[in-house]
Image (cartoon, grey):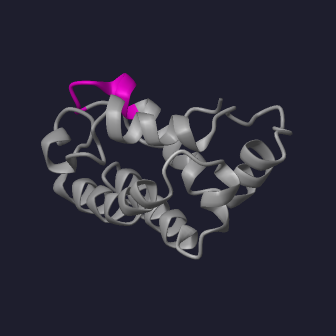
Amino acid sequence: MEQPDVMMSGVEFPDARLNVVAVLESLADTGHQRRVWLDRGPAPDDAVDNLDLVVHVLFDDSRVLEDPEETVGEVLRSRDEARAARALAEVLGPLVDELGDVGDEVYLASPRWPDVVTAARDVLEAMRGDDR
């Protein structure tokens, strides 16, 4: 996997931040989702993941979407990152609650999925913006 252009310093758990960035990149990339999650035909440089792993990392492992503000200094570096993560949680969380344990294709077919992708891109932008 290519090293992300997001600084890992300045947080207590840089490895967790690295994992968050990796799954956000998947969540923000519809091409990756089609290739890896649906077609199961990853390119050589693709991370092999699925939506279940993404949700697990963001809500359970890192708590970045469960309680973004509490992870500032641990995984997130700023309130701007926490605000963007909160916005993602507000679109992804209800979708997960509603759809539950179904295949990735059901999530990607949801009319609300583009909002999830956009919110994930916004979190990545905030994380990258903190490093400028």
Residue located at (27% from left, 38% from top) = 63
**Residue 48 against residue 116 in the figure, above or below:** above
86 displayed left or right of 28:
left
Whole-percent x, y for residue 34 in the image = 77, 54
In the picture as drawn, the residue positioned furthest to the bottom comes out as 111
7 displayed left or right of 11:
right
Whole-percent x, y for residue 19 in the image = 45, 31
Is 108 in the magenta?
no
Whole-percent x, y for residue 132 in the image = 35, 54
Nearest the viewer among 92 and 121 is: 92
Whole-percent x, y for residue 54 in the image = 51, 40
Nearest the viewer among 102 and 3 is: 102
Residue located at (84% from left, 46% from top) = 39
Residue located at (82% from left, 39% from top) = 40
51 displayed left or right of 56:
right
Residue span colored magenta: 10-17
Residue 5 in view in this figure: yes
Is 13 in the magenta?
yes
**Residue 17 against residue 121 in the figure, above or below:** above
Tell me where residue 73 sits by quadrant. Answer: top left
83 displayed left or right of 117:
left
Residue located at (56% from left, 52% from top) = 27
**Residue 57 against residue 98 in the figure, above or below:** above
